[in-house]
Image (cartoon, rainbow, N blue to C red):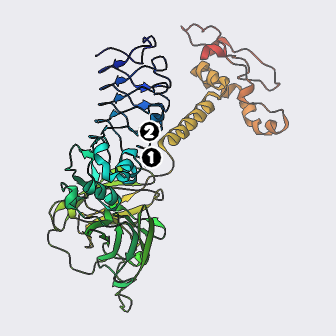
Amino acid sequence: MSALLRQIPANIPQDIRKIRIENSHLTELPRGSFENVSALEYLWLNFNNITVMHIKSLEYLPALKELRLQGNKLSSVPWTAFQDTPALKILDLKHNRLDVLPEHALRYLPNLTYLDLSSNQLTVISRDVFYSWPVYQRSQRGEGHIEAISNAVLALHDNPWICDCRLRGFVQFIKSVGPPIILMNSYLTCSSPKFRVGKFFYEVELNSCMKPLTSALDTNLTVPVGLNVTLTCFVQASPPPAVWWTYSLKLLRAFNVSTEPISEDMVRSELLIPAARTADAGNYTCTAANFLGNTSVAINLHVRSPWASSTTTTPAWAPIGPAESGAHVEVRIAKQTVYGITLEWFAVAAAAGEPGETWYTLLVGRYDTAQKDAIYIGPGINTYSVTDLLPATKYEVCVAVRNQVPRKGQCVVFVTGSDISQLEQREKLIHIVVIVCAMVLAVPAGMYACTAEARPGCLARCPSMCPRRRREGQAQAAGSKESTLDSLPAGSEDGLCLPEGGRSIRRPPACDEPGKTRPPHRNSADLY
């Protein structure tokens, strides 16, 4: 008891007749778990964490009479494993997670006198499970000698039984069962459907199962633009079917569809189309399915425009009826990207019943166009993302209650961003700055040397010393070799003034200002 065992011990004596391991940490019964204890008669493994039971876990146990697995986590049992335990009389599986009982489950338990399947997850059982049980078969063959047949106790209570046509045979078996089979608790109750919750088996009469049969009162509808349209189909089926609507092979959202039972084997499904538009015209298909098959019915919807003969142009989103008083919605942009926005809205006044029942119409389009795309938003939703918009484009988005015309404050005008990101713009700016810096640094050092080293006195006397040079400058420039400031030696004082013969002369001392020492020679590297 309460031992930290994670597997069956391997050193069990061979002559052991009873093993009891409870409140431990066993998680599985592997193959050949008890192959060395063939004399075992009683095996109690209650309140462990066993989830897996190997099909050969009970091998080499021909003398086993009692197996208790109460309070574990078994979701299925390999019933063919009991072929290795022909002497088994007591099988306790209560408080597990069994949800299926196959038809052959009891076939290999011929001597069973106690079977407890209570407090599991069983919902549907075929009566053939018990019709193939050798104990039941013997009772049917020896009806005149029942006293010679041992009783078998059967516990099936506290399971979530689904009382529909699939349980019909089992309910009939429970109603008719008698000795030698004895129910521990004969008051089995239904857990679903809703109209049978809590009812006892002996109180219900279940019909046979049938494939869904779909129908519609009108399969061809014509409605004006802006009218709320409800498409209805009826389905007769047992068990209750799953129903869905499709439009142009596209599954419609569930909050537009309501399905409810109107009798035991009849359901009604309705599809709501608020403020019908011409784009809503087409074939709508109602499909129903259960385990026996599926059927469908198509409803053709035509939407006619009341402004077809009018001379005035009316926007496609204009409503038919007048706006309701107090029908006002506040709209704001929660998030904006280059290609879309996310809108949030809330109703400042309950104009159309409870807030949880209010429908909204979202109108999206370019600002300069009257035609807007309509998106219908169901109750309980107050946010929507509009994507796939064009960049650098002006749009208008409006949110209105039901099919009413948008009022002031219910529309938002915005411009989508450019498809050039800020990072790309920053990179371009950096490239421009780099190019400008390179151009500035490329200015010759000689130009800076000339302007920095030349003295005002000398520069003032140079024009008088070289008048002829100045007069003949243009004529000689055409015939002489190209000479520019770039060719001057950096930091040199020679060549600034040349005589007519072209020979260089040194500046006279008069060029130097009195009282000022001549600076040392500087090369171009020193300038920087």
Residue at 63%, 21% (x, y): give it.
Answer: 449
**Crowd band around label 2 with a 10 angstrom C-alpha radius: few (<14), some (14–19), many (20+):** some
The residue under the point 23% across, 80% down is: 321
> In 3D space, how far apart are the residues under numbered discs 2 and 1 (Cα atoms)?
8 Å
Q: Look at the image and tell me in which quarter the C terminus lies.
A: top right
Residue 365 makes an appearance in the image: yes
Q: Is residue 499 left or right of residue 239?
A: right
Residue of label 2: 79
Quadrant in the picture for the N terminus: top left
Q: What amino acid type should be assigned to the residue bearing mark 2? A: Trp
Q: Given contact means CB atoms under 8 Å apart, are the residues at marks 2 and 1 in contact?
A: yes
Question: Residue 24, image x and y in percent?
Answer: 32, 19
Secondary structure category for the residue under label 2:
helix
Q: Identify the amino acid type marked 1.
A: His
- For disc 1, the marked residue is 104
Q: Residue at x 60, y 16 (%)?
A: 527
Above-or-below relation of 373 to 133: below
Residue 453, located in which quarter of the rendered image?
top right
Q: Is residue 138 positioned above or below 414 on the image?
A: above
Q: Nearer the viewer, residue 251 or 35?
A: 35
Residue density around tag 1, few if under 14, some if 14–19, many if 20 or more, within 10 Å: some
What percent of the width, then of the height, locates residue 458?
A: 62, 20
**In the rendered image, the vertical position of residue 12 relative to residue 22, given as above or below:** above
